[in-house]
Image: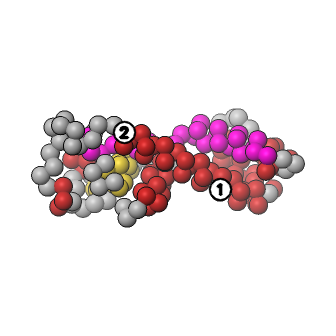
Amino acid sequence: MSDDKDLRAAVAAALQASDAETAWYFDRVKLRVVSVKYGAVSDPLLRARDVEDDEIRFIAVPAVTAGEIHLWMEAFVDDPSNEGNAVVGASLDSKTGANARFEERLAKRAPEALTAWHRYRQARMFEAADAWIAGALTQPTPGDGIGFVTDDLDDH
């Protein structure tokens, strides 16, 4: 990653990735995100097994859950900027599939509110990415004398 904004965006993308066949990992040595899908790594110089087995250098990035997104939706509905917009509040329910229905209802009834929701959700995703990165960087690092091999890291 070339800078913090790129890293933040990459982690945010991994947090919201919906492809169940792809695993996302934060590389704490190179400060980047790599993916593994069907044994192939987004960085062709890495082997999937090395990424998946090295839990010190590569930390799995968990997907944000539907429950977390629903909580963001509730906060969005309660946001003072939506006060007076009955469509927004009426669009959210708590039944199975509520998140998709919320977006479908906003798209049909209040497209400007859907755009606002997407901006709100992206801001929450960036906050989640920032918090996740901070947590990942406070764990023991490869140079902390815990047996991490660094002989060829510059080649990757």
Quarter of the image for the N terminus: give it: bottom left
Q: Residue at x 75, y 45 (%)?
A: 79
Color encoding of the figure: secondary structure
Nearer-N-terminus badge (2/1): 1
Instruction: Answer with left or right where residue 121 lies relative to residue 79.
Output: left
Residue 42 visible, this orientation: yes
Residue 27 position, x and y percent, is: 31, 50
Query: Residue 64: within the magenta?
Result: yes
State which quadrant residue 119 falls in.
Answer: bottom right
**Magenta stretch bounds:** 56-80
What crowding class fits label 1: few (fewer than 14 Cα within 10 Å), some (14-19), or many (20 or more)? few
Residue at 54% across / 39% down in the picture?
65
How far across and down, in percent of the image, does residue 89 sit?
Answer: 80, 43
Q: Is residue 23 magenta?
A: no
Residue type, label 1? His
What residue lies at 29% left-to-right and 37% top-to-bottom? 140
Image coords of residue 94 (percent x, y): 70, 35
Mark 2: amino acid? Thr
**Quadrant containing the C terminus in the rendered view:** bottom left
Dot 2: what SS?
Answer: loop
Residue 118, numbered circle: 1
Residue, disc 2? 138
Residue extending farthest to the bottom is 2
Q: Nearer the viewer, residue 50 or 33?
A: 33
> Callout 1: helix, strand or loop?
helix
- Classify 26 as above or below 96: below
Which quadrant of the figure has residue 113? bottom right
- Residue at the left extreme? 151
Identity of the residue drawn at 65% across and 38% down: 71
Residue 70 percent location from the top left of the image: 64, 40
Q: Does 14 sit left or right of 57 as displayed?
A: right
Relative depth, front residue between 109 and 14: 14
